[in-house]
Image (spheres, rainbow, N blue to C red):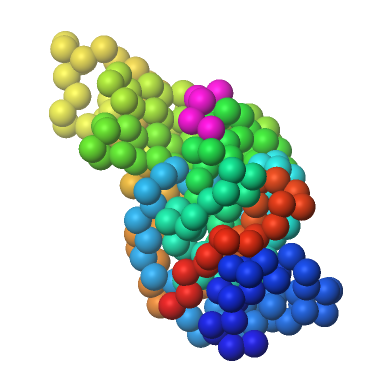
Amino acid sequence: MIESHLETLLTAGFTDRLGERDKKLLARRATLKSCWEPPRLYLPTNWWYAVPGETYEGLFTALDLHDRVPVTFDEGVGVEDLPTRSDAVPVFITPELDGWRLVFGHLDTVVTMDWDAMMGAAERLSAACGEAQMFLEDIAGGTDIWVVAEQGRIRRRYAASSDPEWVGEPLPWEERLLDTEDFDAGYDEPDSFAGTAGATTACGHLSVDPTLLDADTEVRGHGWLALNAPGVGHKDLDVLVH
């Protein structure tokens, strides 16, 4: 299967009619391409989740994703720019990157932007995969969020929009606000739980920073393009092929 065929299959909806043998060939093609095609740095336009590569299979049930198609990193990374249908919204699960799988794309529709729904998704993912993380940085909007959940519960969270909120004990790699030179006990309200790291710093310590992906990133397997509803088909959902 040559490179341009995947876009044709998806656009025409032929991937929905592939037999098991053809699906295995598609997966083999994506795996082989991923071996020599290093991931490029990526600046997400929305939030993303991260789960361990060894236990990632649980994420499909946790996020209620269906009808997955094997893709490479380059083919799936433009998922947020892909067209959507009212009954078919695509989500991209990356190949394993330095031991982690990242989940991108249209999460504002699939999960919704409701705070409880976003946190609930992180908890479900951690219950299904053992651990899960969420990251969101919107410099223009002043939003900065990172979450670490384990075994179905949030262990550590930072959320800043106007007033920063810290939940849970600081993690070993974190610098506490109390320990910085800028902290003034006579002016600032002491909070032993407060740290200093935002999402950009946290993702590099916790899993993978997508803006730092390069040829040195260890890649295993292939990615997946999945939909938020079963049996609706991939027709007219184009994958960006480079």
The single residue placed furthest to the right in the displayed view is: 20
The quadrant of the picture occupied by the N terminus is bottom right
Residue 120 to residue 216: above or below: above
Residue 46 to residue 155: above or below: below
The structure residue drawn at horizontal position 50% and vertical position 46%, both measured from the top left corner, is 106
**The quadrant where residue 158 appears:** top left
Magenta segment includes 113: yes
- Left or right, residue 156 beside residue 15: left
- Main SS, magenta residues: loop
Residue 36 to residue 84: above or below: below
- Left or right, residue 198 beside residue 218: left
Horizontal and vertical percent for residue 51?
A: 60, 50
- Left or right, residue 212 beside residue 95: left
Horizontal and vertical percent for residue 113?
A: 48, 30
The residue stretch that appears in magenta: 112-116
The structure residue drawn at horizontal position 59% and vertical position 81%, both measured from the top left corner, is 5
The single residue placed furthest to the bottom in the displayed view is: 2
Horizontal and vertical percent for residue 234?
A: 65, 60
Marker count (numbered): 0
Q: Nearer the viewer, residue 55 or 232?
A: 232
Q: Nearer the viewer, residue 214 or 46?
A: 46
Horizontal and vertical percent for residue 116?
A: 55, 23
Does the image show residue 122? no
- Left or right, residue 172 beside residue 60: left
The structure residue drawn at horizontal position 22% and vertical position 32%, both measured from the top left corner, is 180
Does the image show residue 83? yes
Q: Nearer the viewer, residue 31 or 87?
A: 87
The quadrant of the picture occupied by the C terminus is bottom left
Residue 57 to residue 40: above or below: above
Magenta segment includes 104: no
